[in-house]
Image (tube, rainbow, N blue to C red):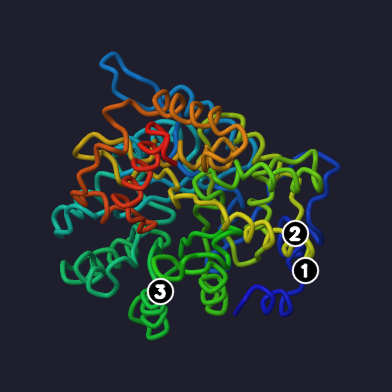
């Protein structure tokens, strides 16, 4: 089902009504106090905030040894503010932020009544797929998060490698049966998976669901107005297809990457200008969040907020939520089409590829490059207006953003990063492309 077919069936008015808070007939208007939009999980009655807190991008500081560690005081402040303003869904993983995320979330959340929030975490057994190692990871999550049950538990990033990879991670080692036992004991309230992969891989999991072999309580997908119809179709699937398949089965959906790793909060200047002409008082990011919230099967939309500014802005968006109209959905489709013309790397800054064994700051290189493209400071050719200025600006800012010894030209194509990337980015190839671009700038041969 494509987007237009879905809209014809549902109607923009139906979307708006579905986005209203429980007990309300219409979506929240701009007037009046903020009221977080809640969605009822149709399978168990949970009242879940439509805005969820993704714990993959907690604020970081340097410790005495220069190591990046989570700023726990800042995390506590953000969690307190989030709960106060109606956010009750917190999503983490044992592998986020080099293994620090769960502990920080546990410290912050345990200061509040357990019934006031939902914890979602994952079985991220990428490295050790043995039953012993996986169960140890599972049990350690209880300790880190200071809880005796998980509200929402996910098999992390399934899809890549298809049936064979899934069987190795969860079936052959007996983990699926183990998790079913944990669910029966109440230690897992809802069991689902997060998906990264191709269409035929997603179809396999839906076929297993239909056959009653693998029954999912919810599914987490990447969905935003770019990936809605503009995913590459090979490594990632258009979100309109994923949404339609889950919707027709009545499976609740949790959204990840609504901002594409921040790219939809910092869109190219020409696109930002068009958005601001329409909504001068709203943030660029609010368009992306309203897109996700406008679909009624969406239970929760995750946002990885690194400081109070995006937290407050997102609460404003969901506290005065207005579903997108058909005309606004068409506008975002046009913006997505325009964005595809920019030579960006599809990096979401998840840092799954880190640490690089050769010390390269992979997400740092990609984020700097993408930022230069979207901000219009990207030097394209010697014939370009202000080429010399843009060339110098890129080289200077690159050295400031990424230490010389951690830049793209140090990649030896070992391929260690490839299996870890949920976006299936050909990382060595993209690093070499950027390294060649930088070298051409330095040699003035672009």
- Extreme residue in the right direction: 31
Query: Quick one: SS at disc 1?
Result: helix
Residue 321, placed above or below residue 324: above
Q: Are marks 3 and 1 in contact (CB under 8 Å)?
A: no
- Can the viewer see residue 348 in this picture? yes
As measured in the structure, the alpha-carbon distance from the residue carrying label 2 to the one carrying label 3 is 28 Å
Q: Earlier in the sequence, mark 3 or mark 1?
A: 1
Q: Which of the labelled discs sits on residue 264, or is there none? A: none
Q: Which of the labelled discs sits on residue 202, or is there none? A: 3
- Quarter of the image with the N terminus is bottom right
**Viewed as shown, does residue 361 lie left or right of 315?**
left
- Extreme residue in the bottom direction: 211
Q: Are marks 1 and 2 in contact (CB under 8 Å)?
A: yes
**Viewed as shown, does residue 238 lie left or right of 175?**
right
Residue indicated by mark 2: 324
As measured in the structure, the alpha-carbon distance from the residue carrying label 1 to the one carrying label 2 is 8 Å
| Residue name at image x 38 percent, y 40 percent | 363
Residue 374, placed above or below residue 19: above
Q: Position of residue 364 (x, y in %)?
A: 39, 36
- Please rate how many residues cluster around mark 1, counting C-alpha atoms within 10 Å: few if below 14, some from 14 to 19, many from 20: many
Residue 410 sits in quarter = top left
As measured in the structure, the alpha-carbon distance from the residue carrying label 3 to the one carrying label 1 is 28 Å
Q: Position of residue 107 (x, y in %)?
A: 39, 31
Q: Earlier in the sequence, mark 1 or mark 2?
A: 1
Residue 344, placed above or below residue 196: above
Residue 88, placed above or below residue 341: above
**Viewed as shown, does residue 273 lie left or right of 301?**
right
Q: Position of residue 97 (x, y in %)?
A: 34, 37
Between 290 and 432, the residue placed more toward the observer is: 432
Q: Position of residue 184 (x, y in %)?
A: 33, 66
Residue indicated by mark 1: 12
């Amino acid at each position: 089902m494509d987007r237009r077919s879905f809209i014809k069936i549902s109607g923009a008015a139906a979307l708006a009504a579905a986005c209203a808070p429980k007990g309300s007939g219409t979506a929240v208007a701009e007037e009046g106090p903020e009221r977080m939009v809640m969605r009822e999980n149709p399978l168990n009655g949970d009242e879940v905030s439509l805005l969820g807190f993704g714990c993959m991008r907690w604020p970081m500081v340097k410790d005495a040894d220069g190591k990046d560690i989570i700023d726990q005081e800042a995390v506590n402040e953000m969690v307190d503010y989030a709960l106060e303003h109606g956010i009750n869904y917190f999503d983490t993983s044992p592998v986020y932020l080099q293994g620090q995320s769960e502990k920080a979330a546990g410290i912050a959340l345990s200061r509040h009544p357990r019934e006031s929030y939902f914890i979602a975490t994952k079985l991220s057994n990428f490295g050790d797929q043995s039953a012993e190692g996986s169960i140890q990871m599972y049990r350690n999550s209880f300790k880190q998060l200071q809880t005796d049950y998980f509200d929402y538990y996910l098999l992390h990033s399934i899809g890549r490698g298809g049936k064979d990879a899934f069987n190795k991670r969860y079936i052959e080692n007996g983990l699926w049966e183990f998790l079913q036992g944990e669910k029966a004991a109440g230690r897992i309230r809802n069991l689902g998976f997060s998906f990264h992969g191709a269409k035929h891989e997603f179809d396999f999991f839906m076929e297993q669901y239909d056959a009653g072999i693998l029954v999912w309580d919810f599914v987490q997908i990447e969905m935003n107005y770019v990936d809605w119809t503009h995913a590459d179709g090979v490594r990632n699937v258009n979100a309109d297809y994923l949404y339609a398949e889950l919707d027709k089965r009545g499976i609740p959906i949790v959204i990840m990457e609504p901002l594409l790793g921040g790219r939809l909060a910092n869109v190219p200047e020409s696109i930002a200008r068009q958005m601001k002409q329409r909504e001068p008082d709203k943030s660029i990011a609010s368009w992306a969040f309203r897109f996700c919230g406008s679909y009624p099967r969406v239970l929760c939309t995750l946002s990885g907020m690194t400081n109070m500014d995006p937290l407050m802005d997102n609460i404003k968006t969901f506290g005065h939520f207005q579903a997108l109209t058909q005309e606004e959905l068409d506008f975002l489709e046009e913006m997505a089409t325009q964005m595809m013309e920019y030579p960006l790397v599809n990096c979401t800054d998840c840092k799954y590829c880190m640490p690089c064994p050769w010390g390269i700051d992979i997400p740092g290189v990609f984020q700097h490059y993408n930022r230069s493209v979207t901000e219009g400071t990207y030097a394209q050719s010697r014939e370009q207006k202000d080429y010399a200025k843009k060339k110098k600006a890129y080289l200077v800012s690159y050295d400031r953003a990424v230490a010389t010894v951690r830049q793209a030209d140090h990649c030896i194509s070992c391929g260690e990063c490839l299996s870890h990337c949920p976006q299936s980015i050909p990382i060595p190839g993209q690093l070499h492309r950027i390294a060649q671009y930088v070298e051409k700038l330095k040699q003035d041969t672009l």
